[in-house]
Amino acid sequence: MNKSYEVEYCNLELRFDRRHIQQLIRDLIQDGYSLYWSENESIFIISVRTGRKLTKLRFQRLGKGYKLVGDYVIKDAKLAEWLEKLIGELRGHAVVKRFKDRQIFIENILFGEVIRLVEINGMEHRVIYQKGPVLDLEKMAEIYASQSAEQQLETLQQELDRELERLYEALQKGDDASAEACKERLRKIRIKLIALEW
């Protein structure tokens, strides 16, 4: 392995479910990595030993799933390969900086696809690849807004489920006042859901 090998992952965002994390642990162990993991209500951490270095992958709990977040510097080619494979398969986002000799290659990855590749050599930099039109701030804001809308939709869906349970219980007890209050809250949730779908 090249001793000067180094890849930096910035603004990394990958969404997982628990099954993906368990598979990742199995695959890393099969590949000969020494690792351990810990978990609490908000975060799941996998610590991977690469030589004398310990890399901690942080998975933030997000509803029923997890999100790999943060910035990572990886000096192990095989582990970097794993991360790249995951970014592609899970349609993740990242800014990847590869350091080779005196050059830096920067890839902007959006939804698992390289949209821009820049080479920096000393003071000079050149764009090697640019997919389609340049994403301006307005388009980026739209993308982040759509992700925010996804999260709001998930929250509203959970509220809807809870409210339907309350309505069912109120109807079973014959509590008309509670049932009417539930129906009113359901109407408000429905209006919010319709607004988000537009």
Image (cartoon, grey):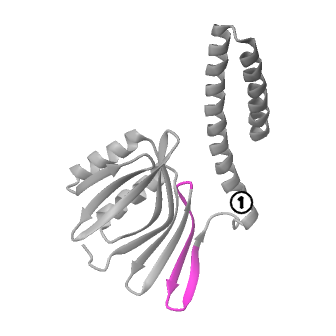
Determine the residue positioned at 77% across, 18% down: 180
- Looking at the image, residue 69 lies above or below residue 176: below
Query: What residue appears at the point 55 percent right and 76 percent down from the top-left corner?
Result: 118
Residue plotted at (28% across, 66% down)? 54
Q: Is residue 182 above or below residue 71?
A: above
Q: Nearer the viewer, residue 48 or 6?
A: 48
Position of 71 relative to 167 (above/below): below
Instruction: Find disc 1 in the rendering and name its residue.
Output: 141
Q: Is residue 151 left or right of residue 22?
A: right
Residue 160 lies in quadrant: top right
Residue 198, relative to residue 86: is it above or below?
A: above
What main secondary structure does the magenta stretch of the protein show?
strand
Quarter of the image containing the N terminus?
A: bottom left
Instruction: Report the side of 112 relative to 23 (left or right).
Output: right
The residue positioned 51% from the left and 74% from the top of the image is 106
**Where residue 173 sits: x, y (%)?**
64, 9
Mark 1 packing: few (<14 Cα in 10 Å), some, or many (20+)? few
Q: Nearer the viewer, residue 100 or 79?
A: 79
Q: What segment is highlighted magenta in the picture?
A: 111-128
Magenta region includes residue 138: no
Q: Amino acid at mark 1?
A: Ala
Q: Position of residue 186 (x, y in %)?
A: 74, 26
Regarding mark 1 in the picture, which secondary structure is present there?
helix
- Residue 55: x, y in percent? 32, 64
Residue 66 screen position, x and y as percent? 47, 47
Placement of the C terminus among the 4 image quadrants: top right
105 to the left or right of 151: left
